[in-house]
Image (cartoon, helix red, strand yellow):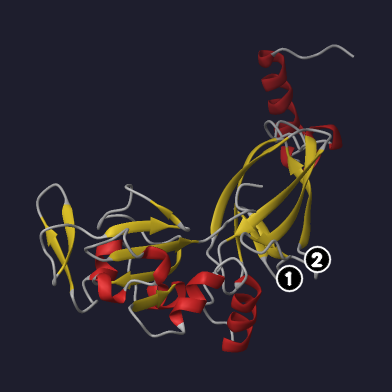
């Protein structure tokens, strides 16, 4: 069969419409280019295991949302979820669950292959029963045992990640401003933390059991599990005596061991 050039094809169209009167669309002629559909060789799949980024526990009922694809899919009891027949290329997906922060993550889908990953979500406890939140916290106690041991003594000021989250604190200075006996003095470029009993020197700062010089009033506290504030030598626990004559701020950060998987 000879392929018609554009002029011959237009004459053929005129002949059909004038002699037969049949709509060309009914004959399937000259409809325009048909979008190509991905073939199996141009598709890939995505297999995820969604987990708690601190404990590593699988999250059941977590969802994955991909633009232009519905409905949302949810994970099984082992945190697993699979998306099939995805066009090759870059894919952006939202992953979330009740009690966890939403996470937006890019994936590169390879044609003819399956991408398998673990995705860690950050715990907030929002909309979860207190019993669930407390059970998870008990599981993390061994890592933060020193914090909880000193918290029971009642000496000093203590605040947990849950209070920080519920009260909307974003920076270290936000928390310290509500602590009696602590002053936060801000200048255009920086903020100083001072104890009311001794404003001549700043308190010592400890992070995860070690002294640190990298935490100031403007430091974000989204990753803080717990905070201890001792406002002078008389409040200092035995392990900090001699290290903070102007008091001490002790921070414990969340160990997101599974965050970057």
Question: Seen in the image, is 211 located left or right of residue 17?
Answer: left
Tell me the residue that label 1 is attached to. 60
Residue 175 coordinates in the image, percent (x, y): 29, 70
Res 116 quadrant in image = top right
Residue placed most toward the observer, 162 or 34: 162
Q: Secondary structure at mark 2?
A: loop
Residue 178 coordinates in the image, percent (x, y): 23, 77
Tell me the residue that label 2 is attached to. 78
At 62% from the left and 70% from the top, the residue drawn is 142
Can you say whether 148 is above or below 207 in the image?
Answer: below
**Which one is earlier in the sequence, the residue at label 2 or at label 1?**
1
Dot 1 alpha-carbon crowd within 10 angstroms: few under 14, some 14 to 19, many 20 or more: some
Question: Seen in the image, is 2 located left or right of residue 86?
Answer: right
Dot 2 alpha-carbon crowd within 10 angstroms: few under 14, some 14 to 19, many 20 or more: some
Please identify the quadrant where the N terminus is shown: top right
Whether residue 23 appears in this view of the structure is: no
Marks 2 and 1: CB-CB under 8 Å?
yes
Question: Seen in the image, is 43 located left or right of residue 92?
Answer: right
Residue 162 coordinates in the image, percent (x, y): 45, 76
Q: Secondary structure at mark 1?
A: loop
Res 145 quadrant in image = bottom right
Question: Seen in the image, is 35 located left or right of residue 224?
Answer: right
Residue placed most toward the observer, 20 or 29: 29
Residue placed most toward the observer, 123 or 40: 123
In the rendering, which numbered label is found on residue 183?
none
């Amino acid at each position: 069969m000879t392929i018609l050039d554009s002029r011959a094809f237009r004459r053929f169209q005129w002949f059909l419409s004038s002699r037969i009167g049949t709509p060309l669309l009914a004959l399937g002629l000259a409809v325009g280019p048909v979008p190509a559909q991905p073939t199996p060789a141009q598709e890939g799949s995505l297999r995820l295991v969604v987990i708690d980024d601190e404990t590593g526990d699988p999250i059941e009922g977590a969802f994955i949302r991909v633009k232009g694809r519905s409905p949302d899919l949810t994970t099984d009891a082992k945190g697993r979820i699979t998306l099939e027949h995805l066009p090759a290329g870059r894919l952006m997906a939202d992953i979330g669950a009740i009690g966890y922060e939403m996470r937006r993550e890019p994936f590169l889908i390879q044609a003819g292959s399956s991408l398998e990953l673990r995705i860690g979500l950050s715990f907030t406890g929002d909309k979860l029963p207190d019993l669930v939140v407390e059970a998870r916290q008990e599981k993390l106690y061994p890592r933060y045992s020193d914090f909880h041991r000193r918290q029971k003594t009642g000496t000093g000021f203590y605040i947990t990640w849950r209070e920080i989250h519920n009260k909307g604190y974003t920076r270290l200075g936000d928390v310290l401003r509500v602590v009696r006996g602590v002053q936060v003095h801000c200048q255009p470029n920086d903020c100083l933390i001072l104890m009311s009993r001794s404003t001549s020197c700043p308190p010592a700062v400890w992070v995860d059991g070690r002294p640190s010089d990298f935490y100031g009033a403007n430091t974000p506290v989204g990753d803080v599990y717990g905070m201890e504030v001792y406002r002078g030598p008389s409040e200092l626990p035995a392990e900090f005596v001699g290290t903070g004559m102007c008091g001490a701020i002790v921070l414990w950060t969340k160990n997101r061991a599974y965050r970057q998987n």
